[in-house]
């Protein structure tokens, strides 16, 4: 990942760091910004960059899968009852994608999030393989949450009363020293929630060392689990994507094969909500889950699975399909990054990185500015993920992280929206700096 | 519901009651039956009547819904994220079917069973509206199970460690005197599981009085719930179907509007597994559930919901569609009933009823014969629902109830299968009677 430069010359104009400006200059500068802000406000704009939502052109890429008219294989009618862990053809496809064995794979309904919720819900009600007692019967259950992270993961923990322990994200994944220390000491820490590739929101891919240490580390809880939400496994923005070490294999090699649940879905490959989700885990875990699933439901939507399998066929085709997605959204990421650089570069009031994939750009403001920025931006008609959402309990301890989701708006809308956003960041930063002066 | 006659003349031959035959006659009769049984066995037949599965011709009825190419309404693209409780068009359709208000309806994924599991799972983890404590935190939770009943309901209770209390099924629903007594006395009884129309397996429809008394009854548990699995609401076999009183309204009228969760699905209307499920409940319950669902998942498969709405449009069309289903499966029910009458009528070794709808014929053998019958039948290649499955814990106290699911095999296969079944019933009955002589 390329770290953007913040100190640079714009043509011949030297960009000043805001902190080095005097109060009068800042006030004058702010006056200009406020004028721009009011101009935008008067346009009654309505942009939504709050969630990682594919745009229409991306959805159109998969319409071909709806042309299928025959929902039968040689020995199965996928329109009828039968089967709990996915049709064999879908298991084969996801086994290839997840680098797993066929009997390590369960292909389910429409979202990995639902599979993660279900796994945690079952752990709370029944425990996982090797649990002496259902997690929900324990006086306290904790889960490690590398942060900033995915707000929907945090919401699941909060719903179940699971205590979330923040672990800092570093450039190669969660602070693994901290993780190792906590899990080795605290028996009530039962798991860690990871988005290991193009992480939400930072776009960070875990290093091989972090993967290996997660797989290998000693955990005080015998039934510790890694929830590995590989949501962006094939979601590269450029021809050369990041690579992520196979944690299933790493766990096997370390003798901890039951430690990890890997999740994946086609929500941002085919259709969000009408896609297919899959998980991979040890055979023993998969076997236990399949038994529970056979009570939980009658089976997944096999017709939809078959639609996907017929259309995508194999990993190569999915990768080719994802290059088409990248062609659509990469210009949007570029537009955002260009404007961020042009408007904020060198001012030392915001820091961000250029991700190689995924759906987000994560930006840190000066401490204590994020909420103000998001509120101001919303008032000008640009909806951004609420400040704090990227941290457990919605509480960003430094009130600085903001997640930008560039995929949905058009490039022109984005340019407008990000310009407003940058104006708001500058105003909020000056407000903050003036307070200190 | 028409009760079949068991004592009758077959032409000029008076059919003898088995219990009135002497041992020698029974032995001779059995020898003939065993010969027929061995003949069947030698044919290596393979028939499956174990579950209520639609046949190919039924599935073909809904193929038209797959022709839709446009998944957008005026203001929504159903291919994308958004919405947790179903698309407005689907809510409208199911509100009409379930006789509920729009904001009392949640349209979900592919099976009512999964919705029931989810409701119970959430009750165990978080309680329901009005619960002082999550059901799973209580030392004991009990649910009333009218029996014979639906094995998959029982499996959910068993998985969660919920104690199941058997309540007898009468011809107008569960023994409502017993239900009222138990729920008024025992605070740990938190609910009752009902298939109120064309019940699985008996085909019984609850009377208005039973519905009213369920809605009205005083319950010791303040957070008592009726799980109303209206799986066969529109699944009539004949032009005049049974009618079921609207329990949502009955509960409202009785001042207990939060008492009931109504479930429904198109599993046996369109495609099992690729259908749409819905629930209806009080606005307050629905509001609480929607909040939880927004954490549990990203939303249902809206494209599939739209497919269903475009195809079925309204209740009238669904009823017309169900008449086509009935045209296909009614002859199968007739074939079974005819053979049961011809082979077993008047012998006083088996009792059954002719249902007006649903998917099953429920048959009672002499006490202590059901397991033997199902085992013998399986050995001759005819798979029937395991004996005992229609009771909690798989334990039929009188070992006599057998569920027959006639929908899937062809009429010819059915005739063969039921003939074998009847031979097995007669052999097992004679075995039992000879033991007593």
Image (spheres, coloured by chain):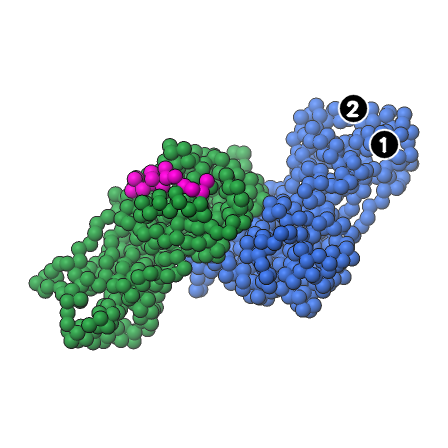
Chain colours: A green, B blue
State the quadrant of the C terminus of chain B.
top right
Instruction: Using the rendered image of the protein, determine whether residue B265 is visible from the camera's viewpoint.
Output: no
User: Which comes sooner in the sequence, label 1 or label 2?
Assistant: 2
- Is residue A367 covered in magenta? no
Q: Residue at x 47, y 41 (%)?
A: A223
Q: Residue at x 26, y 47 (%)?
A: A238
Q: Residue at x 63, y 43 (%)?
A: B53
Quarter residue A331 falls in? bottom left
Residue B74 position, x and y percent, is: 44, 64
- Dot 1 falls on which chain? B
User: In the image, is residue B371 above or below residue B180?
Assistant: above
Dot 2 corresponds to which residue?
A: B35
Crowd rating for badge 2 (residues with CA inside 10 Å; few <14, some 14–19, many 20+): few
> What residue range appears in magenta?
A207-222
Residue A417 position, x and y percent, is: 28, 65
* Foreground residue among A374 and B6: A374
Dot 1 corresponds to which residue?
A: B433
């Amino acid at each position: 990942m390329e770290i953007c430069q913040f100190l640079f010359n714009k043509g011949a104009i030297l960009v000043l760091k805001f902190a080095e400006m005097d109060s009068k200059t800042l006030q004058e500068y702010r006056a200009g910004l406020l004028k721009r802000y009011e101009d935008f406000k008067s346009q009654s704009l309505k942009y939504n960059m709050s969630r990682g939502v594919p745009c229409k052109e991306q959805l159109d890429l998969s319409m071909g899968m709806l042309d299928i008219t025959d929902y039968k294989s040689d020995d199965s009618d996928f329109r009828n009852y039968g089967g709990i862990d996915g049709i064999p053809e879908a298991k084969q496809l996801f086994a290839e994608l997840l680098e797993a064995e066929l009997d390590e794979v369960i292909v389910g309904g429409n979202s990995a999030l639902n599979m993660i919720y279900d796994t945690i819900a079952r752990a709370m009600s029944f425990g996982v393989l090797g649990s002496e007692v259902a997690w929900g019967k324990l006086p306290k259950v904790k889960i490690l949450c590398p942060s900033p992270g995915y707000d929907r993961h945090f919401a699941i923990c909060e719903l179940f009363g699971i205590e979330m322990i923040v672990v800092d994200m570093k450039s190669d994944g969660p602070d693994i020293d901290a993780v190792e220390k906590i899990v080795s000491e605290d028996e009530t820490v039962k798991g860690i929630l990871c988005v290991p590739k193009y992480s939400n929101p930072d776009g960070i891919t875990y290093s091989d060392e972090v993967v290996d240490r997660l797989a290998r580390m000693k955990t005080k809880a015998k039934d510790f689990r890694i929830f590995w939400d590989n949501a962006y496994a094939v979601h590269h923005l450029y021809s050369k994507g990041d690579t992520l070490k196979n944690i299933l294999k790493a766990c096997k090699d370390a003798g901890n094969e039951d430690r990890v649940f890997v999740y994946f879905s086609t929500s941002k490959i085919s259709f969000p909500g009408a896609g297919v989700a899959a998980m991979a885990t040890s055979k023993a875990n998969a076997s236990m889950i399949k038994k529970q699933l056979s009570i939980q439901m009658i089976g997944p939507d096999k017709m939809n699975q078959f639609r996907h399998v017929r259309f995508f066929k194999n990993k190569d085709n999915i990768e080719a399909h994802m290059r088409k997605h990248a062609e659509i959204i990469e210009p949007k990421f570029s537009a955002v990054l260009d404007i961020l650089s042009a408007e904020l570069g060198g001012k030392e009031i915001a820091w961000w990185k250029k991700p190689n994939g995924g759906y987000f750009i994560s930006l840190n403001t000066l401490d204590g500015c994020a909420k103000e920025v998001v509120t101001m931006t919303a008032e000008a008609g640009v909806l951004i993920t609420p400040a704090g959402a990227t941290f457990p309990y919605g509480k960003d301890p430094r009130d600085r992280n903001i997640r930008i989701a560039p995929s949905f708006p058009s490039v022109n809308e984005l340019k407008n929206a990000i310009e407003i956003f940058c104006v708001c960041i500058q105003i909020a930063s000056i407000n903050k700096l003036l307070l200190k002066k």
